[in-house]
Amino acid sequence: MSQQASRDAALPDDEAGLLSVRDLDAGYDDLQVLDGVDLDVRDSEYVTIVGPNGAGKSTVMKSVFGLTTYMGGSIAFGDAEIQGRAPEHIIHEGIGYVPQTGNVFAGLTVRENLEMGAYVLDGVPEDRLRRVYDRFPILEEREDQTAGSMSGGQQQMLAMGRALMLEPDLLMLDEPSAGLAPDLVEDMFDRIDRINDDGTSVLMVEQNAKEALRRCDRGYVLVQGQNRYMDDGDTLLADESVRREFLGG
């Protein structure tokens, strides 16, 4: 008998932790996509959002980062209420965001892309650049190469490295394995695991739902802009309804 995934999408207030989204309504101009979404990420937690195409998964992260039209509800990050605020203000709170596409400056070199990640600082801290190079050695090898001439996997590592230049408390990743060759997907997930193991909270939207749920601490299933299930990844994977409806059996 499988475990039963929870339909209650909100953690108790005393467990909410770093990011707390409550009853969020959001969309684009007059188009509402999210309807009463709840979501939490604790300190150092790895959370994945899965669901069918058009469910609003990416819209959740874009809303946290101030890239959608806010229509109601609340988004708290630490002690700050950030709903309706612009990305240039939200980034100072400690949130990094890597979109699925258009996530590198193609005409700039690898190093210049990483330096752009630190644009809000007075200078480019060499120790932070060193930590990114240690995490992604290929970026140091290619630091003078233009980003647009790199492979898809290398560009994804560069986009993540740029977001990490500000050492965010929360790293949000939108479909990090999209477009990668199958032999590179596991490596990308391993790198995300290590980022989380080092203490950075991760919120990820991912098309490879089974693998994402295997690795995360907790998952959310969104359907038509609303929460359908929330539970730890293993419980969601074991739930017969979740597997049948969203994971291909």
Image (cartoon, rainbow, N blue to C red):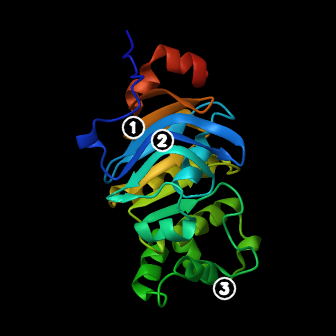
Rendered location of residue 158, percent (x, y)? 60, 69
- The residue singled out by tag 3 in the image is 144
Q: Earlier in the sequence, mark 1 or mark 3?
A: 3
Between residue 37 and residue 5, name the one nearer to us. Answer: 37
Residue placed at 44% from the left, 87% from the top?
126
**Mark 1 residue element:** strand
Query: Quick check: 79 left or right of 148?
Result: left
Disc 2 to disc 1, C-alpha distance: 7 Å
Q: Quadrant of residue 109?
A: bottom right
Eye-nearest disc, 3 or 2: 2
Residue placed at 41% from the left, 33% from the top?
233
Between residue 219 and residue 35, name the one nearer to us. Answer: 35
Give the residue type at disc 2: Thr
Rendered location of residue 227, percent (x, y)? 50, 29
Q: How many marks?
A: 3
**Mark 3 residue element:** loop
Q: Please identify the residue farthest to the bottom as the structure is shown.
A: 123
- Label 2 close to label 1 by CB (< 8 Å): yes
Q: Earlier in the sequence, mark 2 or mark 1?
A: 2
- The residue singled out by tag 2 in the image is 48
Q: Please identify the residue farthest to the left as the structure is shown.
A: 14
Instruction: For residue 117, say whether it is visible.
Output: yes
Rendered location of residue 17, percent (x, y)? 30, 49
- The residue singled out by tag 1 in the image is 218
User: In what quadrant of the picture does the C terminus appear?
Assistant: top right
Give the residue type at disc 1: Arg
Disc 3 to disc 2, C-alpha distance: 34 Å
Q: Quadrant of residue 232?
A: top left
Rendered location of residue 231, percent (x, y)? 38, 29
**Label 2 neighbourhood size at 10 Å, few (<14), some (14-19), many (20+)?**
many
- Label 3 close to label 2 by CB (< 8 Å): no
